[in-house]
Image: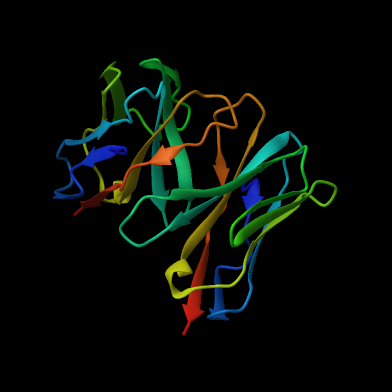
Amino acid sequence: DAGVIQSPRHEVTEMGQEVTLRCKPISGHNSLFWYRQTMMRGLELLIYFNNNVPIDDSGMPEDRFSAKMPNASFSTLKIQPSEPRDSAVYFCASSLSYLSGNTIYFGEGSWLTVV
Amino acid sequence: DQQVKQNSPSLSVQEGRISILNCDYTNSMFDYFLWYKKYPAEGPTFLISISSIKDKNEDGRFTVFLNKSAKHLSLHIVPSQPGDSAVYFCAASPSNDYKLSFGAGTTVTVRA
């Protein structure tokens, strides 16, 4: 079974450039999450989609961050312009539904370095 | 404001012995708790969960204990194996809520 698929796995970019991270959730899952992991803040939820609709983007740090889910099998997280403090591992995750008790499955992460 | 706390950043244990990982939470609305395991360069993978109606859940070598009055849960791994060396995250959420709050993680090293 294919899990959550993320690309790119690694990205090194210069400050000011646009970064787009991509995610394919597990087929049949209705909920999609973008998380960010940093040494300082650990794992934090950035945004959550249910049935392709953004439900809660309160974790998105700034207007430089945006996320879309044009269909049930694809989502993007965009940072424009990128800054060095955006360097982190970005995880996409999906689950059958938003209700607690439904396991969230994570992708392998996109390792972003902004220099 | 960390609602889920793992106060031990690391744990070293000998192969075959018990590993005990601890987690404390502050939000009394949390009623679903999970443990995730993470290897380097991989995403977290679900390990075991427990709802607040239980105080223990067992799955093979892994057992999670929940003490609601103390707002504390623990993960026991018996016996510990070298493949258990990883970072373990405790997570919690209120009922009917998608928002998982994660602890900072505990790095477990199992010595041969």
- How far from the left and from the top, in percent, is residue B41? 30, 58
User: Is residue B104 visible in this depiction of the protein?
Assistant: no
Q: Quadrant of residue B62?
A: bottom right
- The residue depicted at 33 percent of the width and 44 percent of the height is A90
Q: Nearer the viewer, residue B58 or A43?
A: B58
- How far from the left and from the top, in percent, is residue A18? 16, 36
Q: Quadrant of the N terminus of chain A?
A: top left
Residue B6 sits above or below residue A8 on the image: below
Q: Nearer the viewer, residue B100 or A83?
A: B100
Q: Nearer the viewer, residue B46 or A21?
A: B46
**Relative to residue A45, is residue A7 drawn left or right?**
left
User: Is residue A54 visible in this depiction of the protein?
Assistant: yes
- The residue depicted at 53 percent of the width and 54 percent of the height is B89
- How far from the left and from the top, in percent, is residue A65? 31, 31
- The residue depicted at 48 percent of the width and 75 percent of the height is B109
- Most extreme residue toward the front is B60
